[in-house]
Image (cartoon, helix red, strand yellow):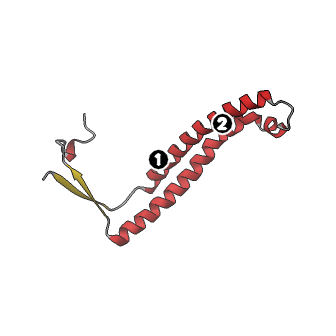
Amino acid sequence: MNNLKLKLKKVDATKYGLIIGSVMALLALIMLIIAFIFTSLIGISTSNSGYEMGYLFGGGFVMVIFGPIVYFIFGFLFGWIGALLFNFILKKTGGLDLEFEKTGLDINTIGKE
């Protein structure tokens, strides 16, 4: 059999937090842009119907700018805390056994061109 067995002992909490925060910020940006477009279209057809607070906050531009920032901050914090908890559990349980199938690439050649 061409199986490679590795044991995961630790995850870098800061890098994991950055990855989770970045993914959440990107998804928030996409969702908020879509929501901004649709609410702008609806807002045009329903003018003077009580949306003064939306105009006060820039008609959605503020949320498109600050929403991803807030999502990144919370994503980073929760990802970082989650990785710390994961590392604590890995330490108590002796790590996580991972099994990979060897497909012709040597472990030393990964990342080299």
Residue at 21%, 41% (x, y): give it. 109
Instruction: Give 15 or 100, whichever is nearer the viewer.
Output: 100
Q: How crowded is mark 1: few (under 14 residues within 10 Å), some or many (20 or more)?
A: some
Q: Mark 2 points at which residue?
A: 35
Outermost bottom residue:
92
Residue 22 coordinates in the image, percent (x, y) = 51, 44
Residue 1 coordinates in the image, percent (x, y) = 12, 53
Residue at 77%, 31% (x, y): give it. 43
The image shows residue 56, relative to residue 2, as above or below, that is: above
Outermost left residue:
1
Q: Residues within 10 Å of mark 2 (few under 14, many from 20)?
A: some
Task: Say which element carries label 1.
Answer: helix
Residue at 45%, 56% (x, y): give it. 13
Under mark 2, the amino acid is: Ala
Q: Name the residue under label 1.
A: 19
Residue 112 coordinates in the image, percent (x, y) = 25, 37
Residue 26 coordinates in the image, percent (x, y) = 54, 40
Instruction: Give 10 or 60, whichever is nearer the viewer.
Output: 60
Under mark 1, the amino acid is: Ile
